[in-house]
Each structure stands twice: as C-alpha cells, then as structure tokens.
Image: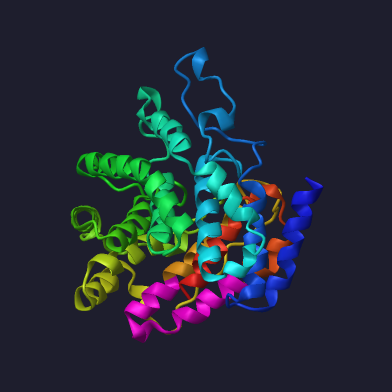
Amino acid sequence: MRKLSFIVLLFCGYINAQTLDLQQAEKIFKLPVHCIEVEYPNKLGQVLGSTNDLKSPKELRPIFYGCFDWHSSVHGYWSIVKLLKDYPQLDESGTVKSILNRNITIENVSVESDFFEDYNNRNFERTYGWAWLFQLQSELYTWKNEDAQRWYRNLKPLADMLVAKYKEYLPKLNYPIRTGQHDNTAFGLSLSIDFARTVGDKDFEQLIAEHAKRLYRADVSCNISYEPGGNDFLSPCLEEALLMSKVLDIQEYRAWLKAFLPDIFNPDFSLEPGKVSDRTDGHLVHLDGLNFSRVTCLYIIARKLPELKYLRSIAGNHLEYSLNNITNDDYMGSHWLGTFALYALMNK
C-alpha cells in the first residue's frame, strides 16, 4: 500500500489548476496505470451458482480484474485510453500499450463475455459498468490508431452483448432508479447515449432518448436540498437534468428544467460541495466523486443554457474542493477517483 499512497501523493501538483494539461494528465494517468493489474484487494460482486464459480478475479475477468472491482477497472482503461489519445507522450516507452495489447485480446474478451452469459450474473454491472464499457469503446472508436482499432474490434462482441441487454432491459424498466450510486438510471443512459451517437448506432440512440423521455419528462420539483446522501457519488437531480439536456431541444429543455429545478434559474442559487470526513473509508470518500460528477453536470447544463453561466462558478468550487483534498486519499479512492476528475475536466 505504500507504493499506492506514493502514487496518490503525485496528484498533489494537480491541485493548483482546474484545467487539464500534460502535467495534470500525467498525474491522473499514473492512478489507473498502476491499478489495472493490481488483483487484490478485490470486490467481485458476483452471484455464486456453484463451487465451480470460486475463481480468482483474473480467472473470471482476464481484462477487467484490477482496480478493486469490474467497473473501476473498465473506467480505468477508459482513462488510460483517453489520456494516451490526447497525450501520447505519456507512454513514450510503449509500456502501457504493451499491457493493453496483452490484456485486450479476443480470447480474454470471450472469457469476459461468458461471465455475462451466466444465468446468475446476466444483470451484472447493470447499467453502470455497461455504460463505462461503452465510454471505453467510444474512445477506441474515435482513436485512429492501429492498436486502438484492434482493441475496439476485440471488445466489440462484449459491447454488442451489453447493448442487446440494454435494449431488452429498458422497455421493462417501469420506474427509473434515482439513487446517488451505481444503479442511477440517468447516469447510465447519459453515458450510453453519448456512445450511441459516437459510433452511429441510431437504433440504440433512439431507444435511449425515447425511454429517457418516458421515465423523466413528467418530473417536477426535484428537491436538491436533500442531497447528498452520506455515501453518494452522483447527484440524482443533476444527473437527470444532464440526461434530459441530451434528449430535448433547447426550448423544451429550458421549460422542463424550470419545472424540474426551478431554483437553479435564480442567479443566487448555491450548492455546497460534499464534505468528506475520512478518505480511507471506501463509502465516505464517494463524496469526492459526487463533487466531480456535479462538476460535469453543471458545466454541460451551463453550455446548454448560457443564461445559467453562474453554474460554472459553483462547479469550480466543487472541483477545487476535491482536487485540493484528494492528495490524502488511499486505495479506496485512488482506484477510481482519477476517472471522475478526468471526466469533469474534459467536460469543462
């Protein structure tokens, strides 16, 4: 754990800026690069059907076995790919690409896919992990690099399977899941519609837009004063507002948001960052993630409706709070928070 703590301390130089440059990118990059092949500690999250299912994380998931759990491993890969695409000098030696070449193979993807075909685990990582796999595929799809295109092709059967599962699941979802954690329906739909648009999957895009409107269009008066919960890393109100900004035109969205979050149109609207009391506690440190995910929502909403430009200041306060404090984190935060910081910064 000393090595992990040292890597997190490298993050400290990042706190003086709220923009992503090479120096900050390098500090974020080190976090997932270190953990994608760290097998333990590990939270498997599976359902055991028999003693035959008692296997090591790497045996079960030969690609996404590191970074504590499957979804964190997936979005750790996303972070690496995103940063390598934008800052290729981060891997001048080719060491990281070698790791990805070794792990993202047809054979390994087949094992990963088989896990989702198991009857007891057919809903595994629905829909949070699915959505991050789509984000990884989006970055690979748009990276015109020989290795990246091969990784994209190798992962495509798994991505296609999860799209099919999503298409089967959404019509059966009578009510959205409004939690501040992994199950949040709006968060999964938001990442997934971005993927559908990136790869040109019109059917998937239309399905998501149709069901987002079905599930959320009639919503009014979201009471954001009840947020956050003690271990939230997503804002139910803002994630829903973000999703609807992606499926409604500007006029429709403005009218919908005024009914859903009327207070946000007050220039004096305020929102305090979530306060973290113990960054070694895997649940309490979620609130740093909440701050980063709020940043993403606030920046994108302010771009959609420019009259809400003051939301950018609120986003900046959230970003500063968690970037200033993440240096004291340990593995419970370092295995995933870099992704949320990166996602917030890239949407600034």
Residue shown at 30%/48% (left/top)? 176
Q: Nearer the viewer, residue 174 or 76?
A: 76
From what the image shows, is residue 305 above or below residue 68?
below
Can residue 320 be seen from the camera position used here?
Answer: yes
Residue visible at 58% across and 32% down? 58
Task: Tell me, yes or no, if residue 236 can be seen here.
Answer: no
- In the rendered picture of this protein, how many numbered marks are placed on residues? 0
Q: Position of residue 214 (x, y in %)?
A: 19, 54
Chosen colour scheme: rainbow
Residue located at (35% from left, 85% from top): 306
The image quadrant where one finds the N terminus is top right
Q: Residue furthest front?
A: 146
- The x and y percentages for residue 18 are 60, 77
Is residue 331 placed above or below 312 in the rendered structure?
above
Q: Which SS type dominates the magenta stretch? A: helix
**Residue 70 lies in magenta, yes or no?**
no
- Could you tell whether 53 is left or right of 39 in the image? left
282 lies left or right of 346: right
Percent across and percent down for residue 316 are 55, 77
**Depth order, front residue of 11/271:** 11
Residue furthest right in the image: 2
Give whichever of 51, 316 is nearer the camera.
51
Magenta span: 298-320
Q: Position of residue 165 (x, y in %)?
A: 28, 39
Q: Is residue 267 above or below residue 239?
A: below
Q: Seen in the image, is 53 located left or right of residue 185?
A: right
